[in-house]
Amino acid sequence: MPVKVLLLENIHPVAAEAFRQAGFEVDARSGSLGEDELVEALAGVSLLGIRSNTTVTPAVLEAGKDLLAVGCFCIGTNQVDLVEAAERGVAVFNAPFSNTRSVVELVLGEIIALARRLPEKTRRMHEGVWDKSARGSHEVRGRTLGIVGYGNIGTQLSNVAEAVGLRVIFFDTADRLAHGNARRVGSLPELLAASDFVSLHVDGRPGNAGLFGAEQFALMKPGAVFINASRGMVVDDAALRENILSGHLSGAAIDVFPIEPKAQGDAFESPLRGLDNVILTPHVGGSTQEAQEEIGHFVSGKLLGFVTAGATALSVNLPQVAPPQPAGAFRLGYLHANTPGVLADITRLLADAGVSVTGQSLSTKGERGYAITDTDAELTEAALSVLGGSPQTVWLRSWRL
């Protein structure tokens, strides 16, 4: 039986092609699925590919009896219950770097567009109004960009922003090395008070929910610009609306929203609609052809490496093992409870079976451990059943490389 793959949300065709070339059966769909629909669709599916609008809940994981791995063809993984997936031995992979440049270019373009008040100018031209005025229009050179969250995207934005003459300050709760002339500040209020542009680049962990609301907007400089291309649940959009209408903020660009439509063409509702000098985009920060193609290659490659050889490098929820691929070897992948003596048990089993070890790797993460053992001969079904029957076993798989 071929491995069945379900790809949702218009994942780039290069992913489907990679799976088909490996002999897998692919079902590629354009929209996301709700919980009940996904439960029904997962019958017999080994690999699930999603983006940000499909939620993989404990009920979904319970229903996916054949599910081996989930590929998030995006940066975020908060749409997947990672703890439950790890408990069931379902590996989760994402694309932490592939669309970084696309997000950065969008944000930089929005900074310049909002500083020049281009959204208003464009709308009035379409209405037939010739509004040739410099009122409220500024260069970005010499102004200060405050970056909240200095990870992969924040650091690259820092580098590109400096190239166009912006001064960069940043705040992050983790220790981060400043790039170029960027300067770290000690608190979020300090950053807000000093920044002409504030751009959010934080992750979707629960602690970041509601990070930006009326209190934070009040601390921003009068006339500043606010940009969110991180997570919708981080910002109180109603509070942002009030600060735009009052004139405290001169503009905003929002790419992510607390509630987003499930499919292409669905109605979009937001308190930010219809405001002057506000750019609204439908979660397209990483949606360039280049980024989506790269993500398709990257995540499909990780899923294929896991299914065909047991590699878990860059898995976000299982111990990470990146073993070599010796030609002709036999490989044993063993996901187990993180208890002492596992390698000794495997070595004893192989010795009793008269099999020699040619390579071995072990990694642990939380309550799980993962061991890959390469041997010069194949283990018998009887030998495999001994280890597979251990109470600490989550799953045991074997491959001929």
Image (tube, rainbow, N blue to C red):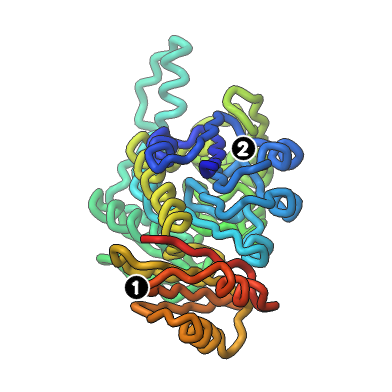
The answer to whether one can see residue 251 in this image is no
Identify the residue shown where x is 66% and y is 78%: 390
The quarter of the displayed image where residue 144 is located:
bottom left
Q: Are marks 2 and 1 in contact (CB under 8 Å)?
A: no
Q: In the displayed structure, would residue 281 be above or below residue 66?
A: above
Mark 1 Cα shell of 10 Å, populated few (<14), some (14-19), many (≥20): few
The quarter of the displayed image where residue 125 is located:
top left
Identify the residue shown where x is 50% and y is 32%: 10
Nearer-the-camera pick, 332 or 168: 332
How far across and how far down the image is residue 152, in percent? 39, 60
Reading the image, the residue beneath label 1 is 177
Q: Residue furthest top?
A: 128
Name the amino acid type tagged 2: Leu
Nearer-the-camera pick, 333 or 364: 333
Reading the image, the residue beneath label 2 is 245
Identify the residue shown where x is 52% and y is 74%: 370
How far across and how far down the image is residue 283, in percent? 52, 38
